[in-house]
């Protein structure tokens, strides 16, 4: 009885009853919630479609070549150097090569040293 005129819901009489006002508010709320839900579903669907397209375009990465480790001589030198410097009991857990990120401190130090030198103009006559 309350929802019998869905299409003509916005048409009020000169003095609407409380039932008509509540019906109008409820229908408006349902329309807004339906619109928001459909937008949420559409954005989720678009995100899922883009993700599947991106995953299908990426090529599988080749398996990394296993590292055969350091030569025994290099490992012996590193262990001897650590044993000479560290006096407390210790255990070497991991040895890895330097990466460009590790070299940043050394490069910055070198650039500061070179920048600190005052250049003297030479007279070339």
Image: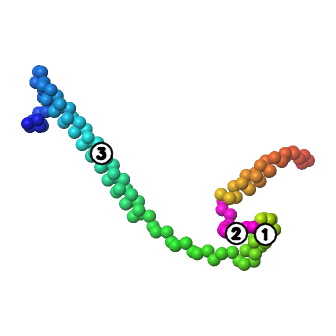
**Nearest the eye: 42 or 18:** 18
Q: Which residue is mark 2?
A: 92
Q: Which mark is residue 83?
A: 1
Q: Using residue 47 as the reference point, say whether residue 108 is left or right of it.
A: right
Earlier-in-chain disc, 2 versus 1 = 1
Q: Which residues are magenta?
A: 89-100
Q: Using residue 68 as the reference point, say whether residue 110 is left or right of it.
A: right
Please name the residue shown 57% across and 74% down the image: 65
Earlier-in-chain disc, 2 versus 3 = 3
Residue 24 position, x and y percent, is 17, 32
Please name the residue shown 27% across and 46% down the image: 38
Q: Which mark is residue 39?
A: 3
Q: Residue pushed farthest top?
A: 14
Residue 10 position, x and y percent, is 15, 30
Q: Is residue 15 above or below residue 103?
A: above
Q: Residue pushed farthest front?
A: 89
Q: Using residue 115 as the reference point, say whether residue 66 is left or right of it.
A: left
């Amino acid at each position: 009885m309350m929802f019998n005129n869905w299409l003509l819901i916005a048409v009020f009489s000169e003095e609407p009853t409380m039932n008509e006002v509540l019906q109008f508010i409820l229908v408006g709320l349902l329309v807004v919630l339906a619109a928001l839900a459909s937008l949420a579903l559409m954005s989720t669907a678009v995100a899922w479609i883009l993700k599947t397209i991106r995953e299908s375009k990426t090529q599988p990465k080749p398996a990394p070549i296993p590292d055969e480790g350091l030569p025994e001589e290099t490992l012996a030198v590193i262990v001897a150097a650590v044993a000479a410097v560290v006096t407390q009991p210790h255990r070497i857990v991991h040895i890895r090569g330097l990466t460009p990120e590790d070299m940043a401190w050394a490069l910055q130090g070198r650039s500061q040293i070179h920048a600190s030198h005052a250049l003297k103009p030479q007279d070339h006559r």
